[in-house]
Each structure stands twice: as C-alpha cells, then as structure tokens.
Image (tube, rainbow, N blue to C red):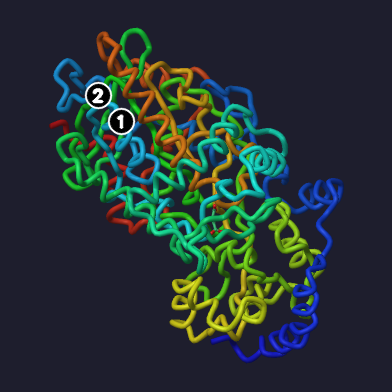
Amino acid sequence: MYPEYMKESLNKVAQTRNKRFELAKSGKPVYPPMSAEEREKVLNKFHPDYKPEARRKIRIGPNKGEHLTTEVADMLESHSRIKTELFDLTRPDYETDILIIGGGGGGCAAAIIAKQNGAKSIISTKLRLGDANSMMSQGGMQAAVKPQDSPTLHYLDAIGGGHFDNKPELVRALTEDGPDIVKWLEELGVVWDKDEEGSMQVLHGGGTSRKRMHSCRDYTGAIIMRTLMDEVRNHPDKITVLEFMPTVELVLDNKGRCAGGILYNLETEEYFTVKAKATIIATGGYGRLHIRGYDTTNHYGATGDGLVIAYRAGAKLLYMDSVQYHPTGSIFPEQIAGFLITEKIRGAGGQPVNKHGELFVFPREPRDVESSAFIKECLEKKNGIETPSGRLGIWLDSPLIEMLQGEGYINKQFPAMHRQFIRYEIDITKEPMLVYPSLHYQNGGVEINAKCETNIPGLYVVGEASGGAHGRNRLMGNSVLDYNVFGRRAGEYAAKYAKSVKLGRLSLKHVHNYENELKKTKIKTDRIAPVLLPFYTPEDVRKRQLTAHYEGTLR
Ligand code: MEZ
C-alpha cells in the first residue's frame, strides 16, 4: 500500500490518464523521441557511466592501459583463490570433451548442442542448475519472424541501440539465427504467447522499429530455462552437472590452449581438477557487484566470475567500460528495491510519469537514454516521488494498459508482476508502480568471434560473459536471444574442435605469472577473485569463501 503522503501525486497521475489515453489511442506519438543530439546530451550529463570516477585505467593483463568500469578494474586486479603449487595436474579428477562453466541458459544450450555433435560435457555451476539471470528475464526474446520484419531490420536496430560499437559479425549471427531459435525452443517445449489465430504475439521494446518481442507472459526466462534444463537432465550419460562447484581458475596446456579448470566445492571446500579438450565460459554478468552503488535486477550469483578467470588466462575483454541500467527497477516497496519491472509494460502501453502526472520522455527510448531521462527528472528537475527512506522514483502508469488493451490484460500478460505487487497491497491494474534505474546488464565481456572463439585456442565464451554483440547498450530481448544463439554456436564449434585437439602438459603457470605481474606493478590488494558471492552474503558463509584461499583442501 502506498503511504498517505503519495496520494496527492497518485491523484495527479489518475487525473492526466484520460488525456494520455486519448493521445495513445489516436496512434499519434505520445511524446516525441529524442534527436541524436538530445540523446547525447542527456547521456553525458546523467548516465552513471559518464561520471569521471566511473572508469579507471587497468594496470595489468591483456587490456592494460584501457579504461574499464572502476569496480571491474578493481575485481580484475586481484589474487587467485588457489595456490598453484598445490595442484598435481597429471592426475585430473575428471576428464571430458568440454567443460562448460555456468549452468544458466547459455551453458545449457551449449551442452545440448555439443551432445548432438557427439561431445560429452561437464557443467560446473556455482549454485544450482538454472540459478541464473536467464531464469529471471521477464519480457521476452527478440527475433524477426513476421512478414513486415527481417533480420536486416533487427540488425539495424541492434547496431543503432549499441551506439554503432557492436561487432558486425556478432550482430549478424544474432539476428540471422533469431527465427531458428524461436522454432528450436518451441520444438523443445517452450509455449510462446500466440494470438487467437495461432500466430506469434509480438510487442515493441525500447529502440525497436518493428514489433518482434516474443514472450511467455511475464516469465519468459523461467519457461525457456526450465525447458533447457529438462533437456540437459534428460541426457545424464552425455552431460554431467556439478552443482555448487564453480570453476575458480582455467587450466592451460604447454601450448597456451585452454584445457579445463580448477573447481571448488562450496560445500566441502575441496578443489577438483577437470581436464577438457575445450572449455566454454557461460557465467553471465556482474550485477551483484552493484556498480556505482546501484540496486540490481540480477541473480544472486551474478558476480562476474568468468571475466576474472578468462582475463587471468590472457583473454581480451571488450567494452568493459559500459554498464546497462534498466530504466524500470522497482523502488517501492523497499523490500523489492531493484527488482525488474519488465520493459514489456512499456511495450504494452505503460507510461513513465513524474510526480505531477506528466509524461516527460518517449516511453521506449533505448535503455541508456530512458534511464538517463529518469535520473534527470528526479535529480535536476526535482520531479521524482520520494520514498519513505528518501529515495526517488518515477511512476510507471500501468492502469493505462488496461484502458488501452482491455480489462484483464494485466492479469493475463503480467501474472507474476500482478501477484508480486498484490502481496504489498498494490493493485497495478488500478495504481501505478514506482520505479528507478537498476543495474541490469554487462554490455561488454570477453571478446569473441561468431564461432564464440576467443584469443585463447580452446576457450569459448557465450552470453553476458562475452562482449561485442550489443556494443555499448543492449536492446531489450536481445540477451535471451544472445545466450541461445551463441550457446548453440559454442556447443557446435567446441565439439568440432574437441574432436581434433591433442592437449599437451597441463599448467597453471598463467595464474602464477599474473600474481607476479601484480607484484611487479606494485599493486597492493587483499582482493580475491572470482568473488563468487556478493559482499552482503552472511558473515559466516562469506568468511569461509574468503579464507578458502588458504584453507581449501585438495581432494
Ligand atoms: O532483455 C531484457 O533485459 C529483458 C527481456 C528485460 C525485461 O525488461 O523484461
């Protein structure tokens, strides 16, 4: 229930609703989209990435000298969790064709396709299979399947949204594989939203020129993830899943090829060695680093682990200076601060309005621009709504959707969101939600090509852990597509590579060298990474993770 003092502002939103409804219904633009110059201006002044302290030079490793997001540079300039001299790599605990690091959508898609290509894999996952951002995506997946659309138009939208910084070959792979992914997922068991004639239901997202967002109500990620997990679990002879066993370092061979990893059992505190002909990193992003102190929409395990181990092994990173803030994270009730309020709400006609009930921005600008406009409205224009703890937010007018799409639409299309707010005595069919930008996505990552190969032979990266497909700003629904497209590609190419490679002597020399580089550069830090768990993990659990560096035992 909203506090009494918000009622005056809520009344203003209700008073302007009819007029906003008439305009939206007329088909005329409800608010003019910004020009390129206006976008640039609002980004420069208000986007968190553009603050001088948001980036700093990294002093070691393959990207040495480049400016990275400050928290990412701090995480990369860190000590390993392991003492390399303790490991006997001549007798690995496991041997397999492919080690897949990460049990989210990308990892599962890779394992399924690797199996079809005759390869056995081990999935090493920090939490349970499916505990990932893939499970949490709500609004949908972009793919150009309609007659008025095409992969070329999808390509142009993605490139424009990414500020023309995207790697063209990756955008091409993303958009051209899109229609196939819709079909593949449906064949595996995903039940897409369809209209009464049985055609795919599609909606707009921010920055899209055509409606191409495919959804499963507002739990698209959960449906896709569960389907992929079922498929993985159906093949225990070919896919082994090791839960609560994150990979904490990669292993290379004497020719610099990736040859597996060191896994750490979070429950028993034992280390295990895995020898693999090829390795795929699918560890997702870093939202739980809470860059610039922002709340996050991300899963508890999103601590950027894959970036650290790849970087220490010599993998080059791309666009690690760019963070995505989703415009509509929940800001009230404060128990769910940061939670995702899907962009599908705006795709269905929901509007962001200020404390006077005024629409102040085109509702579907690309995410970085929309977020910056919200921050400006709150901080510069002083038109935000204050929460009881002094945070500021913008109304997201959901009752307007019921007027535009018909009564019952919210309950049908957003059942999870509807229920979520009912718990706090807020009925979003009648009252708006209060939102503010929330850290949502890591735009950059390990540099890959369209086969998901990195600069380290035998190391493949997919999904949010990779960089380049989305340039410096991803559009909605392209990440669900991304982990499916590149997960499948990595599974195929890694399986083919695994058939021909003959590994040499295994080594952790790169970890040792990295420690030496820290010393030589006089970097003094007590940071240990991969981080594995966020900093607010309960003290007793956290302490165990930190001391594992010294106390972890070998099997
Ligand atoms: O692609 C996303 O980030 C997504 C689908 C999020 C959402 O707003 O629902």
The percent coordinates of residue 413 (x first, y second) are 50, 71
Decide if residue 283 is on the left or right side of residue 429: left
Number of dots carrying numbers: 2
Viewer-proximal residue among 282 and 174: 174
Vertical comparison of 512 with 300: above or below:
above
Question: Helix, strand or loop at disc 1?
Answer: helix
The percent coordinates of residue 98 (x first, y second) are 28, 27
Residue shown at 41% from the left, 36% from the top: 487
Viewer-proximal residue among 178 and 229: 178
Dot 1 corresponds to which residue?
114
- First in sequence, mark 2 or 1: give its number: 2
Dot 2 corresponds to which residue?
97
The percent coordinates of residue 521 (x first, y second) are 53, 20
Decide if residue 311 is on the left or right side of residue 103: right
Q: Are marks 2 and 1 in contact (CB under 8 Å)?
A: yes
Vertical comparison of 307 with 422: above or below:
above
The numbered dot on residue 67 is none
